[in-house]
Amino acid sequence: MRFIADFHIHSHYSRATSKQMNISSIAKWAQMKGIEVIGTGDFTHPRWFEEIQKKLEPAEPGLFRLKPEYEKEVQKEVFKSCRTDMRYLLTVEISTIYKKNDKVRKVHSVIFAPSFDVAAKINARLQKIGNISSDGRPILGLDTKELLKITLDASEDCLFVPAHIWTPHFSVFGSRSGFDTMKECFEELTQYIYAIETGLSSDPAMNWRIAELDNLAIISNSDAHSPGKLGREANIFNTELSYPAITKALKTNDTKAFESTIEFYPQEGKYYLDGHRNCKTCLTPKETKRNKFLCPVCGKPVTVGVMHRVEDIANYRQGYKPKNARPFKCIVPLPEIISEVESVGVASKRVQTKFLNTLEALGNEFSILLDLPIKDIEAHGGVMLAEAIKRMRDGNINIAAGYDGEYGKIKIFDDKDRERLSSQESLF
């Protein structure tokens, strides 16, 4: 069966995360987005681990569902057009900070676990190393290679995925604290890395340029800290609905079972280009090198972004595409599209109301963004919304690229477009 999965999310026990990231809200918004398999996130946090054990029950092998009494309440809040029989998979992101080869390393990793028993084994080991109670994404003074070893010792069925591998400050290839190769990070255990996560500021095509990643599955997840961010990146599978089937598809990099990914436009990610946010300075790699990696405004070092970092360690030319390349589609979240159409902020009441009305009438967000006929969107949402989604599907949009923690800004219509389409809207 075909389904969409988002494995990397956080609970309300993680820092800088919405209080709405609870079991019920995650279940509700995963369905509204069109996600059928969602990661639990944060299984190392004792209180969250207790909560998910209380509210989830086994479904297919290695997957879980809400217990009937909780699901009944959630389904009351989900539009009929969006309801689905969704599943949970046990996941956690862990931050490791340590010194290796005379340099401080800061790496984030996502771990998949096949059962509560295996997750409990991992938790017991990590509890002896550091504080896993203070943050849903624990920070440990532990070599990432040792974290991988602990994971494999708990169960060979676990999957260990380097997270958002290009993020400057916290990733395996990060410009500020990462490595130049996977081998340097994981040494003899590199063979147990079967998949990597792109992060919002890179897409699969950028990762295709790295020879070390040739045979690895390239996955994409939301890293959501609030319900509205669920599914901003995700994965499309066409396989049996079970943990063994999902992890087998990833470990074998099977392009039929793991079909494709749904991506942020990488330019919209907050570390795509180089720059210095405090000075509102955004630079291309060439400009950065010309300025000797210093901000032209204040003279301090700039944050080297993902595009620059990929270029530095790439083995293949830009545009290289491997034979077994998995397709991907870039999207703009529906609230952002509606914000552009309405010319008001994405958090405004007008945008939120139109967003919910559209879901209720047309179905989940992924189906609207990717599959629904444009004429059906126009019949409900109007000419401008239909045209905006068509342009997004065609990649016909403009993006002021993100840099140094600042998200990129999407622009779909110029003034002439808006005037012309508004006239059609009036006629409509």
Image (tube, rainbow, N blue to C red):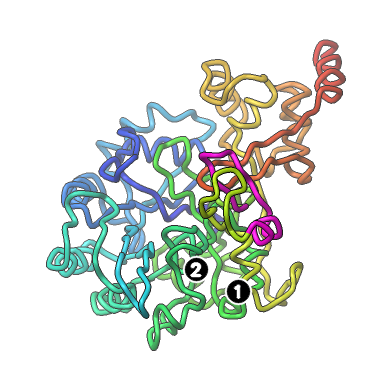
Residue assigned mark 2: 173
Q: CA distance from mark 1 to mark 2?
A: 9 Å
Percent across and percent down for residue 349 are 52, 16
Left or right of residue 400: residue 79: left
- Quarter of the image for the C terminus: give it: top right
Q: Residue at x 58, y 49 (%)?
A: 295
Q: Nearer the viewer, residue 269 or 57?
A: 269
Left or right of residue 56: residue 1: right
Label 1 secondary element: helix
- Magenta segment: 273-291
Residue assigned mark 1: 313
In the rendered structure, are the residues bearing label 1 and label 2 in contact, judged by CB atoms less than 8 Å apart? yes
Q: Residue at x 23, y 68 (%)?
A: 118
Is residue 123 within the magenta segment?
no
In this picture, is 180 found above or below 47?
Answer: below
Q: Residue at x 32, y 60 (%)?
A: 95
- The amino acid pointed to by label 2 is Phe
